[in-house]
Image (cartoon, grey):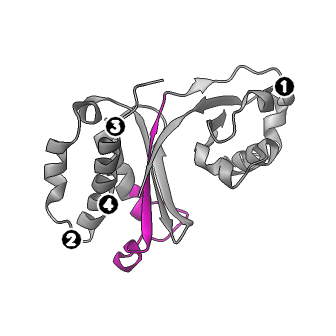
Amino acid sequence: MTDKLSKKDGELLLKLARQTILRKFGQEDGELGSLKTKISKKVLEENRGTFVSLHKKGDLRGCIGNIEPVKTVFEGVVDNARHAAFNDSRFSPLSYEELKDTSIEVSILTRPKIVDYTDAEDLIAKLRPDIDGVMIKKHSHSATFLPQVWKQLKDPQFFLNHLCMKAGLKSDEWKSGDLTISTYQVQLFEE
């Protein structure tokens, strides 16, 4: 596993996400630029997968990220905060009035690893609820659930059924054995 970020870095990343959203409303307080001087070199230089999730009064209000480490942590959080607030196709763009009732989560991902499994039973045995994020892929269809989703979908079969449907596949497609399934873990920071 890649080294974990410090609690201080996590707090600064949450501020970064909120300031990025506020900036879009013209409300950013100038702290965005100074955050770069306070945050660790690891956050500024290390490429990692990142997700930003928004919750309004406990309900999902936006979630966008990248699984692969294509951007630095800093860049990923900025981009994903903006997209989670304003470009998640499942939701209308976040309004300024909603922001006060919205909490932010930042997830820093490990690099995904392909799960080698023989059948549906073996796959379920290899998944670790509440620990593993799961990504499925079949041809042009793909989807992921962060480990936090296990809180709502505790049963592994139910979890995989919903993940397949999210990818636009039949709910039991995971039983066929011809999917590429990868797992990853996250370090979660939340307001």
Picture residue at 67% right of the left edge, 30% below the top: 181
User: Toward the viewer: 110 or 4?
Assistant: 4
- Mark 2 or mark 3, which is nearer to you? 3
Question: Which residue reaches farthest bottom?
Answer: 97
Q: Is residue 172 magenta?
A: no
Q: Disc 1 versus disc 2: distance between alpha carbons?
A: 52 Å
Q: Disc 4 versus disc 1: distance between alpha carbons?
A: 43 Å
Local crowd size for mark 2, using a 10 Å CA cut-off: few (<14), some (14–19), many (≥20): few
Local crowd size for mark 4, using a 10 Å CA cut-off: few (<14), some (14–19), many (≥20): many
State left or right for residue 77 relative to residue 183: left
Q: Which residues are magenta?
A: 83-110
Q: In this picture, is 43 found above or below 98?
A: above
Residue type at mark 4: give it.
Arg
Residue type at mark 1: give it.
Asp
Residue where numbered disc 4 is placed: 18
Picture residue at 65% right of the left edge, 35% below the top: 137
- Which type of secondary structure does the marked residue at label 2 adopt? loop
Which circle's residue, 2 or 3, is located before the other in the chain?
3
Residue where numbered disc 1 is placed: 119
Q: Position of residue 116 (x, y in %)?
A: 71, 19
Q: Position of residue 77 (x, y in %)?
A: 35, 47
Which circle's residue, 4 or 2, is located before the other in the chain?
4
Work out which quarter of the rendered image holds the C terminus and state it. Answer: bottom left
Residue where numbered disc 3 is placed: 6
Q: Disc 4 versus disc 2: distance between alpha carbons?
A: 12 Å
Residue where numbered disc 2 is placed: 26
